[in-house]
Image: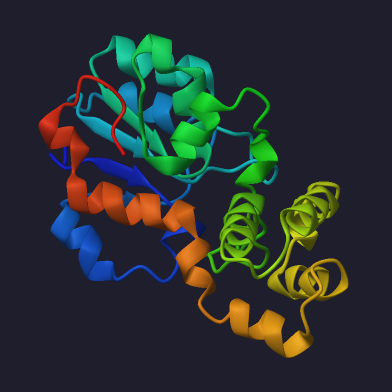
Amino acid sequence: MSTGKPLLYVGPTAFGVDPALFSRGGVAVLPPIRRGDVHDLVTSGTTPGIIAIVDGTFHSYPSTGHAEIRSALEQGWEVWGLSSMGAIRAREMSTLGMKGFGKVYRRYAETANFDDDEVTLVHAAEAPYQPISEPLIHLREALRQLAAGGRITMTAAEEITGFLKRRWYGERTLRLFKESLVDMGGLSSDEASHELRNFDSYRIKTHDLVSFLEVKPWLSRPSRPAG
């Protein structure tokens, strides 16, 4: 039994993405992956195909395991990882054949001390998995662009990054971020609000997902990580 479509495990990273994009991408959308999902799939008699991991559980349920992904690879499944949990697993299992895609994956692949909590957030438990907090990787991207544009200093960007890094990921909200831009970045409240009005432009996890669906790298079979 097989859908013939790539199986895409995704949750809050897809929040706000046009549903038509998934249809055009030709994927079957599944909830965030958890421990046992891949094992159940590869032992169900399903013809090996393509698995794409974006979001996955961290604390509410055990995260997807390396052993089950390795088993899928050994049985002929093509496994991709991007944006969030998928990017982490793709970095960890690249030598075993798991494929990575996108900017978030490259950040993990190229930065030895890039922690798992960089992509972690609190979100609603049910679809469409509305985000409640903001992943640190998005806040880093906002600070990088604000500093590059001269809106805040590099010193302020580093101070704010350190402040956010020390906070629990569930506390990393846009409200807290705005407060930090005022308190440590030297912006007025109105200026901070103005800079955050188009925060979607900093959400690189979602950008990677959109790019994955548009590029469809599983069709071109790249010899090295795409993105």
Tell me: residue 58, above or below residue 121. Answer: above
Residue at x 32% of width, y 45% of height: 8
* Residue 127 appears in the picture as rendered: no
Judge whether 19 appears above or below 38 on screen: below
Q: Is residue 6 left or right of 203 when viewed as pictured?
A: left
Give how far across and how far down residue 214 sits, in percent: 20, 53
Question: Which one is nearer the viewer's eye here, 124 or 113?
Answer: 113
Is residue 107 visible in this depiction of the protein? yes
Against 199, residue 161 (above or below) is: above
Q: Quadrant of residue 58?
A: top right
- Residue 138 in picture, x, y percent from top left: 58, 56
Q: Position of residue 181 (x, y in %)?
A: 77, 71
Q: In the figure, residue 151 lies in which quadrant? A: bottom right
Which quarter of the figure is the C terminus placed in?
Answer: top left
- Which residue does the image show at 47% across and 54% down from the upper left? 204
Q: Is residue 177 left or right of residue 66?
A: right
Q: Where residue 70 sits: x, y (%)?
A: 41, 14
Residue toward you, 106 or 15: 106
Q: In terms of depth relative to the viewer, which is nearer, 114 or 147?
A: 147
> Could you tell whether 213 is left or right of 69 in the image?
left
Quadrant containing the N terminus in the rendered view: top left
Above/below status of 179 relative to 91: below
| Residue drawn 50% across the image and 25% down it | 109
- Identify the residue at the far bottom of this view: 190
Is residue 175 found left or right of 193 in the rendered image? right
Which residue is at 69% across, 84% downward?
191
- For the residue pair 197 and 117, the one nearer the viewer reads as 197
Which quarter of the picture shows residue 221? Answer: top left
